[in-house]
């Protein structure tokens, strides 16, 4: 007898799934999308444009849009902090591509990350910040939760003295439906830890660096 499938939060990792399980998930999802098309009176059997769409959409969700739920976090390459550096390090913009949990519409924008490393700790490879952002973005999300997931993970694996994460993004659930607002309209939020939470001047330095790095002046 199979164990019941426990409910999971939409942006929660469910564990590393093998190829066979992912294949079964894709097949079941494709069948469900076929049923949805039937309800919406979209002919996916005879229309050449939509004949394979249920399978394509199912693969897109499982292998791309939600892959962060079914895979392990990216491995972290770290280096000795040989010079005992405790100065602010800022990287960005890092591309954010996610999906709104409320309407299944894209969220896209940029993330910026600030780190105050521990003098006796480690430094991580610069590209790993991009991979971490990508990993947590690849699931249904709320931006308010995404920024904290990224920050908490980096704190857990690197143990810095301070950390800041800032995301500026467009939500297509607002630009393509409902109020249909301007695509220039963005949501901006931040998450701070340690010295970046407690030290106002350091936090302001991070925000100034974000503005300097912002290619479009989205603020």
Image (spheres, helix red, strand yellow):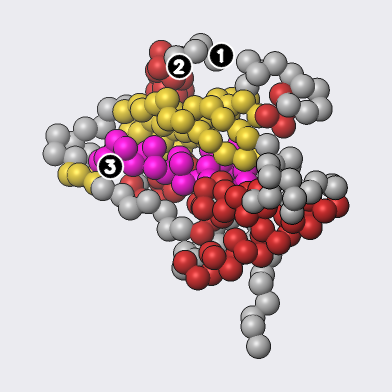
What is the quadrant of the N terminus in the image? bottom right
Q: Name the residue under label 1.
A: 219
Q: How crowded is mark 3: few (under 14 residues within 10 Å), some or many (20 or more)?
A: some
Residue 66 pos. (x, y %): 56, 50
Q: Mark 2 points at which residue?
A: 214
Q: At 62% across and 54% down in the image, what residue appears?
A: 55
Q: Mark 3 points at which residue?
A: 124
What is the quadrant of the C terminus in the image? top right
Disc 1 + disc 2, Cβ < 8 Å: yes
Bounds of the magenta segment: 123-149
Q: What element carries label 1?
A: loop
Pick out the residue farthest to the left. 82
Residue 106 pos. (x, y %): 63, 35
Task: Report the front residue among 33 and 133.
Answer: 33
Q: Is 206 drawn above or below residue 105 in the view shown?
A: above
Distance of mark 1 from mark 3, alpha carbons? Answer: 29 Å
């Amino acid at each position: 007898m199979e164990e019941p499938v426990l409910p999971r939060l939409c942006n929660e990792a469910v564990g590393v799934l093998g190829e066979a399980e992912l294949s079964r998930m894709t097949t079941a999802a494709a069948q469900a999308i076929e049923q949805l098309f039937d309800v919406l009176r979209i002919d996916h059997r005879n229309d050449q444009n939509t004949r394979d769409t249920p399978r394509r959409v199912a693969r897109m969700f499982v292998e791309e849009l939600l892959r962060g739920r079914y895979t392990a976090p990216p491995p972290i390459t770290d280096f000795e902090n040989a010079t005992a550096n405790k100065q602010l390090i800022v990287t960005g913009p890092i591309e954010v591509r996610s999906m709104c949990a409320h309407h299944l519409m894209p969220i896209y924008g940029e993330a910026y990350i600030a780190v105050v490393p521990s003098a006796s700790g480690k430094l991580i490879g610069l590209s790993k910040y991009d991979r971490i952002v990508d990993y947590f973005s690849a699931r249904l999300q709320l931006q308010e939760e995404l920024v904290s997931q990224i920050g908490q993970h980096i704190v857990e694996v690197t143990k810095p003295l301070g950390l800041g994460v800032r995301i500026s993004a467009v939500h297509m659930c607002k630009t393509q439906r409902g109020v249909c607002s301007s695509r220039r309209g963005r949501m901006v939020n931040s998450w701070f830890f340690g010295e970046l939470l407690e030290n106002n001047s350091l936090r302001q330095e991070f925000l100034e660096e974000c503005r300097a790095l912002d290619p479009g002046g989205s603020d």
